[in-house]
Image (spheres, rainbow, N blue to C red):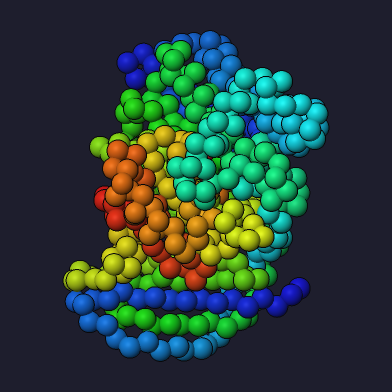
Amino acid sequence: MNAKNGMREFFHHELCMGTAFRFSGHTPFDPAKTEQLVMQACAILHEADRTFSLYKPESPLSRLARGEAAVRDLPPVVSDIWDACEKWEQTTDGWFSAFTPEHTFDPSGIVKTWAAQAAANYLVGNGLSDITVNAGGDIWISDDASGEADWRVGLHKPVSIASTEAGTLTVVDLRGTPFRAVATSGSAERGLHIWNPKAPDRAAANELVQVSVVARDLVTADVWATAAFAMGARAIDLINRYNETHPDNSIEALAIAPEGELSATEGFSSLFAK
Amino acid sequence: MNRDQVHTMMTALAIGGSIVGGAIITQHQVAEHTISFPTTTPTSSGTPSASGTPTSSSTSTASGPVTKQGDMFTEQVFGGQVQLSVTKTNGVISSINLDTASATGGRQGAFSYLVQAAVAANGSNFGNASGATYTTNTFKQALDSALSKF
């Protein structure tokens, strides 16, 4: 027990949605009660996976994709996510799209972080504190995080975490900023899996190898990281322009091009850890 | 064993606003490891799908220590001392390093300043790290070998 005002540290890894989630923080409860709360939070992830996975033939989303059900026939959460995806498509000027090239509704671009945020909110709402979440490489930090390191987030090199060259490229420090989330999109783990919704044939985006986005919440960071990867070489300019008109929802991004060149939005340099 | 070309590009930092003309030097370099990256077809506009892509097909496989010889391209874009080196295997970045060896101050161009700031920040302790969404397989491999911090 690593006590801090009677609090215990906890952390938990959960495999879900084909990736790993890590929750950590402090708990005022005994191990059994803490585990029960963490399991409840993880149940939120698994429920989201059961609902939205297109890899599970009987999921509501799979039924929707096969035309066996309409959105109104499915759990209300499907309609909520549908609406959220429409909103994000507008916000990103069409660079984020939840419709596949085959016109299937596939909201997997936000379900992971949406579910992780819901799980984190559950932990915070039930009395756990200092919460940090790693949702398969996308990071969220609670407002009350007290550890200095908790506020600092490393950005992976654009290589797989299983590679012998794995490591961090740089570190950002979100303390004292309005930002609570960092998300990264890239080709290092799953190849070119993000298509460009504006390409005539919706071809895979390949102008960047990685882009990290810092935002106020996890879903915003995740959506913009995906959108920025699809934008490719124009991402930094487009985000700078977005920030000019949306100062209260500004985001910052660091992009890596295939030859290793770095580019970043205007406010990014103030985020580097000191 | 395929013979992978290893490209290393080094970009140095502009110092004091002076920019030295570019030159490309080709020489040989021995790389200690090679990593194969099976390509996957685009399956989603978002990050990986809710239930995960089949992990076996998207896992990067370390093929163990294999000595490779390839070409190293050194491009001296600016004068100065901070270097950005990128190694590619099968056209995919397998290593990227920002080397601080003898970074000094001075007026820098935007790109150079960014590299220098990124380098300076990298020694900091951190709680979590953000990267492209890993698969459960690569996560387990990394956890087992303690290669990455989560």
Decide which of B98, B101 is in the foreground and name it: B98
Decide which of A8, A151 is in the foreground and name it: A151
Q: Is residue A164 above or below residue A130?
A: below
Q: Which residue is located at x 37 percent, y 81 percent?
A: B77
Specify the quadrant of the image occupied by residue A43: top right
Q: Which percent across, then down, holds residue A67? A: 79, 33
Decide which of A88, B41 is in the foreground and name it: A88
- In this rendering, position of residue A142 left or right of residue B67: left
Q: Which residue is located at x 60 percent, y 67 percent?
A: B92
Asked whether residue A220 appears in the rendered view, the answer is: yes
Q: Is residue A162 above or below residue B1?
A: above
Asked whether residue B126 appears in the rendered view, the answer is: no
Q: Which percent across, then down, holds residue B113? A: 28, 65
Q: Which percent across, then down, holds residue A97? A: 58, 45
Specify the quadrant of the image occupied by residue A81: top right
Decide which of A253, A200 is in the foreground and name it: A200
Q: Is residue A199 above or below residue A36?
A: below
Q: Which residue is located at x 63 percent, y 26 percent?
A: A78
- Quadrant location of the N terminus of chain B in the rendered image: bottom right
Q: Which percent across, then down, holds residue A146? A: 32, 28
Specify the quadrant of the image occupied by residue A36: top right
Q: Which residue is located at x 64 percent, y 44 percent?
A: A99
Number of numbered discs overlaid on the protein picture: 0
